[in-house]
Image: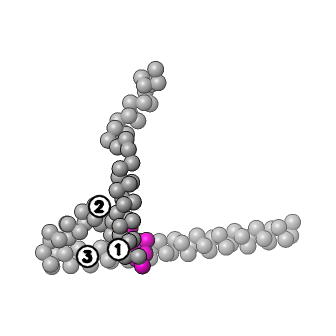
Amino acid sequence: MWQTQSWFLPQRQTTESARCHNIDAEQIMGMFSAAKNNAPNATLNYLSSKIQAQRNGVVDYLDSLDQEKRNKVIQISRTIGGKQRQASRMRSLQIQEDLSQRIALKWEKNSYG
């Protein structure tokens, strides 16, 4: 009965392409475990980035480019990545400042109330 409901069909179409098992998660965890064994001092971010690059084909794409174009793509990526990191850092500092102000206001309220 619920399979004929109007909300079911769009949900079904959305999830049809999803795998019904967790082989992808197991594969990634296996890759992570192997990478951690090969480089025990590597950071989690480094290992994560390396696995993502292997999985999404970035390394193969870069290898297919000639040297000049590869250097240009990498330089642009570094520039954009730096700008994104700076923006993220500024957001983080702003959040910390807002939280500090809220805590100070709360303490002030509690001490006078």
Span colored in magenta: 41-48
User: Whole-Å distance between the Cαs marked 1 and 3?
Assistant: 26 Å
Please state the horizontal and vertical placement of residue 44, each as a whole percent of the image.
43, 71
Q: Amino acid at mark 3?
A: Ile
| Between 50 and 103, the one nearer to me in the picture | 50
Dot 1 falls on a residue whose secondary structure is helix
User: Whole-Å distance between the Cαs marked 2 and 1?
Assistant: 18 Å
Of all residues, the one furthest to the top in this rendering is 1
Q: Amino acid at mark 2?
A: Arg
Point out the tag, 2 or 3, that comes first from the N-terminus: 2
Residue identified by numbered label 3: 74
Of all residues, the one furthest to the front in this rendering is 37
Q: Residue at x 42, y 30 (%)?
A: 8
Please state the horizontal and vertical placement of residue 37, each as a whole percent of the image.
38, 71
Q: Amino acid at mark 1?
A: Asn
Q: Is residue 84 visible?
A: no
Dot 2 falls on a residue whose secondary structure is helix
Q: Residue at x 42, y 25 (%)?
A: 3
| Quadrant containing the C terminus in the rendered view | bottom right
User: Whole-Å distance between the Cαs marked 2 and 3?
Assistant: 18 Å
Q: Are marks 2 and 3 in contact (CB under 8 Å)?
A: no
Residue identified by numbered label 1: 38
Q: How many neighbours does mark 2 have within 10 angstroms: few (below 14), some (14-19), or many (20 or more)?
A: few
Q: Which mark is residue 55?
A: 2
